[in-house]
Amino acid sequence: MVDEKQCLFCRIARGEIPAKKVYEDGECVAFLDINPRNPGHALVIPRKHYETLLDMPDGETGEYFRSVKRVAGLVKNGMNAQGISISSSNGQAAGQVVAHLHFHVIPRFAAEGPPGLESMLSSKRLDDKAMDQIAQAIAKASPEPAAMQDFQPSAPQPRQPAPRPVQAESAIRAAPRPTTAMNKTEQSKKKRDGEDEEEFESIDDEISFDF
Ligand SMILES: [Zn+2]
């Protein structure tokens, strides 16, 4: 557990560390990210220390998301942006760096092109059986954040890993990885050149093989 006295975002929320605040209310604070991905990139944090969204009590999530929405409107209008990307990394495996729940609100501009934040991960090809197994595993899972202990390295580890859909996981690992952006560009060009493809084929075109 990160010490709330030392937590960077707790200290910002308490006013102990300066930040370019753009919004605050009784529960939340929003301030500019010091490494903005676009001008106006803001972080929205709860004043209370929760490491991830899964640690936040259900009764507090509604107000938190209302604040995220408010900040999204402020950032979009304040920066004359055409769009807004909203994301949150939860857990070190997801790329979370500061162990205090935060949502990124990033203004997006038509001139920069339309890539969504999710495009940072390549798409995986999964067959229908694997997709069924994955859907069942998620639908039957507990919503409790039992395994979200990335920031507690001294926490005892379970002897046995939680049951997983083995075949589905194998399918993910065996999934072909996209090669270079150049291939996608070439494929996009091919499509623009007028090849008549059905929709599912054009989706397949987003994946190319490198074995
Ligand atoms: Zn904190």
Image: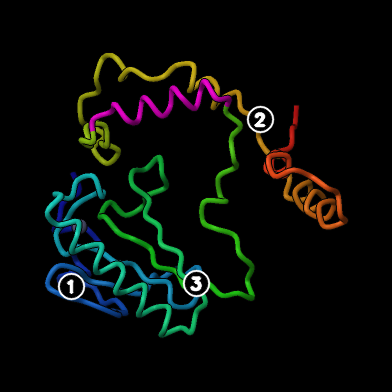
> Mark 2 or mark 3, which is nearer the start of the sequence?
3
The residue sitting at 80% across, 48% down in the picture is 187
According to the picture, the residue beneath numbered tag 1 turns out to be 16
**Majority secondary structure in the magenta region:** helix
Q: Of the residues under marks 1 and 3, which one precedes in the sequence?
A: 1
Which amino acid, mark 3?
Answer: Gly
Q: Nearer the viewer, residue 7 or 30?
A: 30
Image quadrant of ligand 1 equals bottom left
Please provide percent x and percent y for residue 72. 36, 72
Please tell me which residue is depicted at 52% across the width and 77% down the height of the picture. Answer: 82
Residue picked out by circle 3: 83
Crowd rating for badge 3 (residues with CA inside 10 Å; few <14, some 14–19, many 20+)? some
Residue 133 sits in quarter: top left
For marks 1 and 2 on the same chain, the one whose residue lies earlier in the sequence: 1
Frontmost residue, 206 versus 103: 206
Q: Secondary structure at mark 2?
A: loop
Which residue was labeled with disc 2? Answer: 176
Q: Quadrant of residue 116?
A: bottom right
Residue 167 is situated, as x and y percent measured from the top left of the image, at 49, 16
Please determine whether, in this image, residue 23 is positioned above or below residue 207: below
Disc 1, SS: loop
Tell me residue 196's x, y (percent). 83, 47
Can residue 201 be found in the magenta stretch? no
Amino acid at circle 2 = Pro
Disc 1/disc 2 C-alpha distance (Å): 48 Å
Question: Which contiguous range is marked in magenta?
Answer: 127-142
Q: Residues within 10 Å of mark 1 (few under 14, many from 20)?
A: few
Contact between marks 3 and 2 (CB within 8 A): the answer is no
Residue 88 versus residue 136 in the image, above or below: below
Q: Residue at x 29, y 14 (%)?
A: 160
**Closer to us: mark 3 or mark 2?**
3
On residue 196, the disc is none
